[in-house]
Amino acid sequence: MVLIRALEQRILTEGQILPGEVLKVGSFLNQQIDTKLLKDMGEEIARLFSCNNVTKVLTIESSGIALAYSAAVALGVPMVFAKKHKSSNLAGNILTSKVFSYTHQQTYDIMVSGDYINSDDTILIVDDFLAMGNALNGLIDIIGQGGAKLAGCAIAIEKGFQGGGDALRAKGIRVESLAIIDRMTDDSLEFRPQ
């Protein structure tokens, strides 16, 4: 609970609300990273999912990588990330899904080598933000294509008012968000009690 309050306080004091319901937290989470806070967040995610037999952590490039890495280190498992652009070193069995980015207002073909996700895996998805759930749904699709099991989703900041997290929970998917914003206007935000 101390970590959640500390994260909410950082959002209130350093977060910037931009037009289009965008929350900028670049000063501590995804451009400049507060390494102590990130370490604590990774350890909290590991605590929340410690009984789920997680074998890998999966995220999408690029702003989710730091938090996913921190959680993977705390869990003692490898981290895999989906690429948004095909590169020459990505060949063979490619797992792919289409994802619309709310922040960038663009659709990406995300992809992961099938060598890194298989039926022996129990995968935890970790990301910095959850808005409408597009990225998570794309990653869930990739996990299914690889025949792996989904342990759940761990998120730093959920925009609860955009419904993505609640839609995933309604499908029976475990979603744990460290901070959930229930309401956001141009000059204020309100957190969901946890």
Image (spheres, helix red, strand yellow):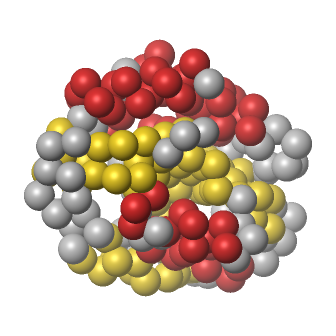
Q: Is residue 37 visible?
A: yes
Q: Nearer the viewer, residue 172 or 181?
A: 181
The residue lying at 55 percent from left, 40 percent from top is 193
- Give the number of marks: 0
The residue lying at 29 percent from left, 43 percent from top is 189
Q: Quadrant of the C terminus?
A: top right
x then y, percent, for residue 21: 22, 59
Q: Is residue 148 left or right of residue 186?
A: right
x then y, percent, for residue 55: 79, 50
Q: Is residue 74 left or right of residue 5?
A: right
The residue lying at 57 percent from left, 73 percent from top is 167
The residue lying at 75 percent from left, 71 percent from top is 172
Q: Quadrant of the N terminus?
A: top right
Q: Nearer the viewer, residue 114 or 171?
A: 171
Whether residue 7 is situated above or below residue 92 in the rendered picture: above
Q: Is residue 76 left or right of residue 14?
A: right
Whether residue 47 is situated above or below residue 125 in the rendered picture: above
Q: Nearer the viewer, residue 83 or 182?
A: 182
x then y, percent, for residue 4: 53, 29
x then y, percent, for residue 113: 58, 70
Q: Is residue 88 visible?
A: no
| Residue 68, picture quadrant | top right
Whether residue 90 is situated above or below residue 75 in the rendered picture: below
| Residue 110, picture quadrant | bottom left
